[in-house]
């Protein structure tokens, strides 16, 4: 049976991906690094990805046929606050995993979740970027992901099997309110309950981004794992909708789904000094290689997100 070792399984994406992988017939072993542990019945091991010996022991013991590597410091402001932790986790953690796979399961197929953030300043051309575009990271998170990508691609050249995914903004229930749409949805839910005055605090609403439902991103990951059974000529895949959406559009959609009248106020602390106006991806390579298409409309995703915050 195909057996996936899923790092970072307790995170926003990991929880959705675990369910999808089980649905696709994989046995899944989750790694978790902190409380709360996953609920009973979910196969899991405790693992700090920065601990090379621990990583080696887990890989040797489990002998996975596939590895999906999500564990990371994934939040840009956190990466500015603690670049060392970010590089130790995102780069050295990836190297620990690569070495363990090379040593103990060299036939395993590895999927590394990188990020569209690696393109950084290249987005300034104002067009959707494909995988051949320059990578010009603008923050420690993006730089660490690009460094890890280089490591993965170099191991691939040495014979390891796998792919690198560059997902664009993904949203949905379960995301931390450190991210923009979850922050809006949380505030609206709190305003509806009378816990916050009817004024929603926002950052830059004019930035254009490429938004996907987290379930669509996870579907793409599952499809990318299928490439393990086919000769692969590509290693790096954007996961994107190809659609530019202003953050203001998403805010308007969320506000339209609330019965309460809510004012909007810009909070200077929410503006990023190096914010780029347009970040959209070209995902034709992924579509051609796997047949993937996003299945969830943005309005539906935002509705699910808002309802999730209403139920908390
Ligand atoms: O702290 P935990 O147990 O929730 O685990 C987080 C995990 N993580 C680690 N795992 C092992 N050793 C570490 N030193 C370590 N540090 C963090 O990574 C968490 O479960 C996971 C990341 O989850 P999120 O921050 O919610 O990220 P998300 O949105 O699920 O993104 C998944 C991946 C990341 O690599 C992104 O950079 C990429 O997709 O685009």
Image: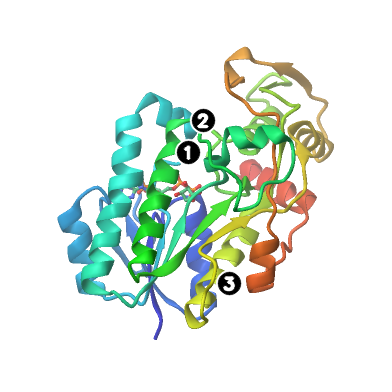
Q: CA distance from mark 1 to mark 2?
A: 7 Å
The single residue placed furthest to the bottom in the displayed view is: 1
Which badge, 1 or 3, is on the more N-terminal residue? 1
Identify the residue at image location x=45%, y=78%.
26
Which residue is the site of mark 1? 142
Image quadrant holding the C terminus, namely top right
Q: Which residue corresponds to mark 3?
A: 223
Viewer-nearest of discs 1 and 3 = 1
The label on residue 174 is none
Q: Residue at x 78, y 55 (%)?
A: 297
Q: Give the distance between the C-alpha atoms of the residues marked 3 and 2, in whole angstroms.
A: 30 Å
Question: Residue at image x 24%, y 61%?
Answer: 99
Above or below, 178 relative to 282? above
Contact (CB < 8 A) between labels 3 and 2? Answer: no
In the rendered image, the quadrant that contains the N terminus is bottom left
> Residue 108 in the image: x percent, y percent?
35, 75
Q: Which residue is more in the foreground, 149 or 38? A: 149
- Nearest to the observer: residue 107 or residue 221: 107
Residue that sits furthest to the left in the current view? 53
Q: Nearer the viewer, residue 211 or 228?
A: 228
Q: Are marks 1 and 2 in contact (CB under 8 Å)?
A: yes
Taking the image as shown, residue 225 lies to the left or right of residue 196, namely: left
| Vertical order, 54 against 103 (above or below) | above
* Coordinates of residue 176 in the picture (x, y in percent): 52, 39
The residue sitting at 78% across, 31% down in the picture is 248
Residue 138: image tag: 2
């Amino acid at each position: 049976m195909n057996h996936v070792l899923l790092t970072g399984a307790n995170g926003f994406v990991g929880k959705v991906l675990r369910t999808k992988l089980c649905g696709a017939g994989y046995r899944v072993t989750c790694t978790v690094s902190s409380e709360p542990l996953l609920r009973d019945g979910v196969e899991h091991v405790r693992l700090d990805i920065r601990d090379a010996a621990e990583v080696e022991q887990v890989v040797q013991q489990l002998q996975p046929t596939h590895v999906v590597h999500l564990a990371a410091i994934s939040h840009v402001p956190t990466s500015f606050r603690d670049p060392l932790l970010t590089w130790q986790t995102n780069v050295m953690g990836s190297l620990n995993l690569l070495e363990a796979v090379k040593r103990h399961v060299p036939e395993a197929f590895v999927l590394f979740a990188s990020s569209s953030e690696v393109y950084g300043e290249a987005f300034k051309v104002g067009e959707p970027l494909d995988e051949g575009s320059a990578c010009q990271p603008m923050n420690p998170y993006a730089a660490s992901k690009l460094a890890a990508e280089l490591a993965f691609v170099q191991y691939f050249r040495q014979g390891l099997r796998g792919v690198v995914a560059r997902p664009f903004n993904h949203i949905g229930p379960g995301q931390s309110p450190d991210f923009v749409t979850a922050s809006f949805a949380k505030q609206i839910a709190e305003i509806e309950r009378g816990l916050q005055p009817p004024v929603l605090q926002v950052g830059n609403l004019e930035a254009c981004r490429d938004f996907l439902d987290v379930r669509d991103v996870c579907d793409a990951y599952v499809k990318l794992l299928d490439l393990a059974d086919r000769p692969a000529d590509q290693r790096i895949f954007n996961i994107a909708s190809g659609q530019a959406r202003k953050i203001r559009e998403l805010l308007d959609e969320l506000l339209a789904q609330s019965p309460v009248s809510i004012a909007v106020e810009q909070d200077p602390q929410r503006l990023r000094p190096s914010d780029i106006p347009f970040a959209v991806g070209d995902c034709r390579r992924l579509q051609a290689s796997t047949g993937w298409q996003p299945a969830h409309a943005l309005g539906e995703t935002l509705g699910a997100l808002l309802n999730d915050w209403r139920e908390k």
